[in-house]
Image (tube, rainbow, N blue to C red):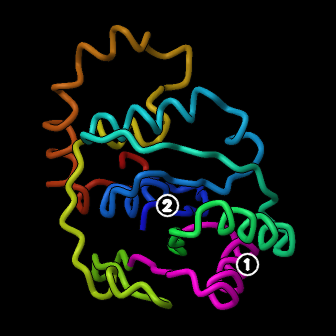
C-alpha cells in the first residue's frame, strides 16, 4: 500500500492513527469543505507527521458527509488514480462508511479498521497486513495538540507565550490522569 484513503473524522486521532502506523507514501483525506479549504488545518497535519519523522504527500478531497453515491464516485476516481490504495474505515460519517464498504467490495481494495477497545487493527476485507496488528504507538500531549489543530482559541493566552510552557503539559496531564476518577466531571 502506497496510498491510504482516510475518511475524515471529527475525532483527530482517527485521522492520524492508521497513517502513523502504516506510513504510506500518500494519504488521501475525504473531508468536508471546511477542511479541504483550510490550509492552516492541512499544514497542521503535515507538521504533525513531520514531528513524527516522515513527510507523506497529503491530498484533501472535498466531499459531502451525507451523500454516499457522491462519495462512492469519488472513491472510484481515487482508486483509478492510485490503484495501490487501501482504505481505513475507522472514522468518518455513516454515508462515507457505507460508500467505503461498497468501494472495497466492488474494486477489491483492502479495507481495515482500528479497535480502540482492543488497541489493534483488523482486516475488514483484503487487508491481511492489518489483521490483529497491535498498535504500539505513543503520543505526547504536544502531539495531541498538533493532531487536533495545534492552536488554542484566540483571547486566552498568546500561543507564542504558551509554547514556552510545553514542558509543563505532560506533568500536568500525569497529575490529571492519576486522580481523574476522584475529580468531578466539571474539573476534567
* Residue 87 position (above or below residue 166): below
**Would you name the residue on which mark 1 appears?**
99
Placement of the N terminus among the 4 image quadrants: bottom left
| Residue placed most toward the observer, 147 or 28 | 28
**Would you name the residue on which mark 2 appears?**
3
How busy is the neighbourhood of tag 2: few (under 14 within 10 Å), some, or many (20 plus)? many
* Residue 99 shown in magenta: yes
In the picture, measured across the screen, residue 113 lies left or right of residue 179, that is right
Cα distance, mark 1 to mark 2? 18 Å
Instruction: Tell me whether circle 1 and circle 2 mark residues in contact (CB < 8 Å).
Output: no
Element on which disc 1 rests: helix
Q: Which residue is at a point 32% across and 35% down the rendered structure image? A: 50
Q: Quadrant of residue 172?
A: top left
* Residue 40 position (above or below residue 139): above
Among numbered discs 1 and 2, the one appearing first in the sequence: 2
Q: Which residue is at a point 73% across and 34% down the rendered structure image? A: 37
Q: Which residues are magenta?
A: 91-114
Q: Which residue is at a point 50% across and 72% down the rendered structure image? A: 86
* Residue 90 shown in magenta: no
Amino acid at each position: 500500500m502506497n496510498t491510504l484513503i482516510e475518511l475524515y473524522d471529527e475525532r483527530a486521532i482517527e485521522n492520524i492513527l492508521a497513517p502513523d502506523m502504516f506510513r504510506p507514501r500518500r494519504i488521501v483525506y475525504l473531508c468536508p469543505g471546511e477542511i479541504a479549504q483550510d490550509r492552516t488545518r492541512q499544514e497542521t497535519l503535515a507538521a504533525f507527521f513531520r514531528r513524527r519523522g516522515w513527510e507523506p504527500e497529503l491530498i484533501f478531497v472535498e466531499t459531502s458527509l451525507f451523500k454516499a453515491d457522491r462519495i462512492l464516485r469519488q472513491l472510484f476516481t481515487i482508486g483509478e488514480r492510485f490503484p495501490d490504495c487501501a482504505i481505513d474505515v475507522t472514522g468518518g460519517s455513516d454515508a462515507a462508511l457505507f460508500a467505503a464498504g461498497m468501494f472495497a467490495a466492488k474494486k477489491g481494495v483492502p479495507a481495515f479498521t482500528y479497535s480502540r477497545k482492543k488497541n489493534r487493527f483488523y482486516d475488514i476485507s483484503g487487508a491481511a497486513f492489518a489483521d490483529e496488528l497491535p498498535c504500539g504507538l505513543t503520543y505526547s500531549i504536544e502531539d495531541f495538540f498538533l493532531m487536533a489543530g495545534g492552536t488554542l482559541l484566540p483571547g486566552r493566552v498568546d500561543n507564542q507565550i504558551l509554547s514556552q510552557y510545553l514542558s509543563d503539559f505532560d506533568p500536568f496531564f500525569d497529575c490529571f490522569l492519576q486522580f481523574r476518577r476522584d475529580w468531578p466531571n466539571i474539573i476534567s
